[in-house]
Image (cartoon, rainbow, N blue to C red):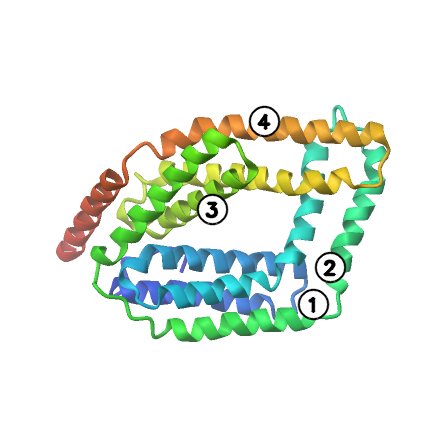
C-alpha cells in the first residue's frame, strides 16, 4: 500500500499502525547491503520524516506521541551529516546545469572535485557503518513498537487537532518568513508546509480527485522551500571553496538569482495554499470524512 489511509483499513488506528510499519520496514530493508548507499540513506530519512508527519496528524489521540517523535528525530540525526554532504554536491550540479548559459563549467571543476571528496570523506568515516547499523536498529525498534500504538479517541476526533495545528503552524511560519525573509524562517516554513503536504497525502481518500490540486500545490511549495534551504547551505561552502574569483562570483550570482526566483514563486503560491483558516479547513475536511463514512456504510 502507499502512504495514505485506505478504505480497507478496519479503523484509523489500524491504518496509522499499518502506514508507520510499511514506511519503516521499507527503510530498514533498503539499508541492508544497498547497491546505492546514498539513495538508501535518502529514502530511509524520507521514511522517518513521513512517519513523523503521520505522528503529527494523530498526536491529538496518541498519548505516546512525544516519545515516538523524539525517537524518530534522534534516529534521523545519526546520518544527517552524510546526507548534508550529498546535498551540497546535488545543489552544485542543479545550479550549474540550470545556469549553464552563463557559467563555464570547466572552470568549476575544482569545486565539483572538492564537493565529491567531501561526500566520499563522509562515507569513509570510521563509524559510518556503525551509525548505519544504529540507524537501522532504531527504525526496527520503532517499527516493532508501532504495532502496539494505542490511538484514542477514534476516527476524525483523533486527527482533527493535529491537522488544524500543523496547518496553523504553516500559516504562522509563512507570515514570519514574509516579514523577515530570513533563511531560518524560510526553513521553518518549509518544515511546516511539508507536514501539511504529508497530511494531504495521508487523507487523500477523503476525495481523491478533488484534493489532487491542493496536494500538488503543497508538494510544489515544499520542494521550492527545500531548494531554498539547499542554496542557503551551499552558499557558505561556496565562499570557502578553493576556486578562482571569476567563476566563484559567477556561481555565487547564480545562487542569489536562483534563490530570489524561488522566493518569488513561494510567496506567490503560499497564500493561495494556506488561504483558509485552520478551523475552516478542518471543518471542510471533516465533512468529507463524514461523507466517506456514509459511502462506506452504503457500499
Q: Position of residue 6 (x, y in %)?
A: 31, 57
Residue highlighted by disc 3: 191
In contact (CB < 8 Å): disc 2 and disc 1: yes
In contact (CB < 8 Å): disc 2 and disc 3: no
Q: Residues within 10 Å of mark 3 (few under 14, many from 20)?
A: many
SS state under label 2: helix
**Mark 2 to mark 1 CA distance (whole Å):** 8 Å
**Mark 4 to mark 3 CA distance (whole Å):** 20 Å
In the rendered view, tell whether residue 278 sits above or below residue 289.
Answer: above
Q: Position of residue 114 (x, y in %)?
A: 81, 47
Q: Is residue 266 visible?
A: no
In the rendered view, tell whether residue 209 sits above or below residue 72.
Answer: above
Q: Position of residue 121 (x, y in %)?
A: 77, 59
Q: Residue at x 35, y 47 (%)?
A: 166
Q: Earlier in the sequence, mark 1 or mark 4?
A: 1
The tag on residue 260 is 4
Q: Earlier in the sequence, mark 3 or mark 1?
A: 1
SS state under label 3: helix
Q: Residue at x 27, y 62 (%)?
A: 61
Q: Is residue 81 visible?
A: yes
Q: Residues within 10 Å of mark 4 (few under 14, many from 20)?
A: few
28 or 161: nearer the viewer? 161
In contact (CB < 8 Å): disc 1 and disc 4: no
Residue highlighted by disc 2: 122
Residue highlighted by disc 1: 128
In the rendered view, tell whether residue 292 sits above or below residue 106.
Answer: below
Q: Earlier in the sequence, mark 4 or mark 3?
A: 3
**Mark 2 to mark 3 CA distance (whole Å):** 25 Å
Q: Residues within 10 Å of mark 2 (few under 14, many from 20)?
A: some
**Mark 4 to mark 2 CA distance (whole Å):** 31 Å
251 or 213: nearer the viewer? 251
Amino acid at each position: 500500500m502507499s502512504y495514505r489511509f485506505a478504505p480497507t483499513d478496519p479503523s484509523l488506528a489500524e491504518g496509522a499502525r499499518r502506514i508507520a510499519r510499511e514506511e519503516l520496514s521499507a527503510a530498514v530493508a533498503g539499508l541492508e547491503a544497498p547497491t546505492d548507499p546514498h539513495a538508501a540513506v535518502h529514502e530511509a530519512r524520507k521514511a522517518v520524516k513521513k512517519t513523523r508527519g503521520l505522528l503529527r496528524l494523530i498526536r491529538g489521540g496518541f498519548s505516546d506521541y512525544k516519545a515516538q517523535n523524539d525517537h524518530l528525530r534522534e534516529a534521523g540525526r545519526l546520518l544527517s551529516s552524510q546526507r548534508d554532504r550529498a546535498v551540497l554536491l546535488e545543489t552544485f550540479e542543479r545550479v550549474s546545469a540550470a545556469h549553464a548559459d552563463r557559467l563555464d563549467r570547466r572552470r568549476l571543476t575544482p569545486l565539483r572535485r572538492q564537493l565529491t571528496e567531501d561526500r566520499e570523506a563522509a562515507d569513509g568515516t570510521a563509524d559510518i557503518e556503525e551509525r548505519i547499523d544504529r540507524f537501522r536498529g532504531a527504525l526496527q525498534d520503532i517499527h516493532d513498537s508501532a504495532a502496539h500504538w494505542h490511538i484514542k479517541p477514534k476516527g476524525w476526533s483523533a486527527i482533527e487537532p493535529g491537522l488544524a495545528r500543523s496547518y496553523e503552524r504553516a500559516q504562522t511560519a509563512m507570515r514570519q518568513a514574509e516579514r523577515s525573509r530570513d533563511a531560518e524562517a524560510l526553513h521553518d516554513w518549509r518544515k511546516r508546509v511539508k507536514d501539511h503536504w504529508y497530511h494531504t497525502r495521508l487523507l487523500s481518500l477523503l476525495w481523491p480527485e478533488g484534493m489532487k490540486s491542493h496536494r500538488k500545490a503543497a508538494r510544489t511549495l515544499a520542494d521550492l522551500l527545500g531548494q531554498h534551504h539547499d542554496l542557503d547551505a551551499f552558499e557558505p561552502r561556496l565562499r570557502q571553496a578553493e576556486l578562482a574569483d571569476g567563476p566563484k562570483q559567477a556561481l555565487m550570482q547564480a545562487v542569489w538569482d536562483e534563490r530570489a526566483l524561488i522566493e518569488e514563486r513561494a510567496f506567490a503560491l503560499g497564500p493561495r495554499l494556506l488561504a483558509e483558516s485552520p478551523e475552516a479547513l478542518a471543518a471542510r475536511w471533516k465533512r468529507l470524512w463524514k461523507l466517506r463514512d456514509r459511502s462506506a456504510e452504503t457500499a
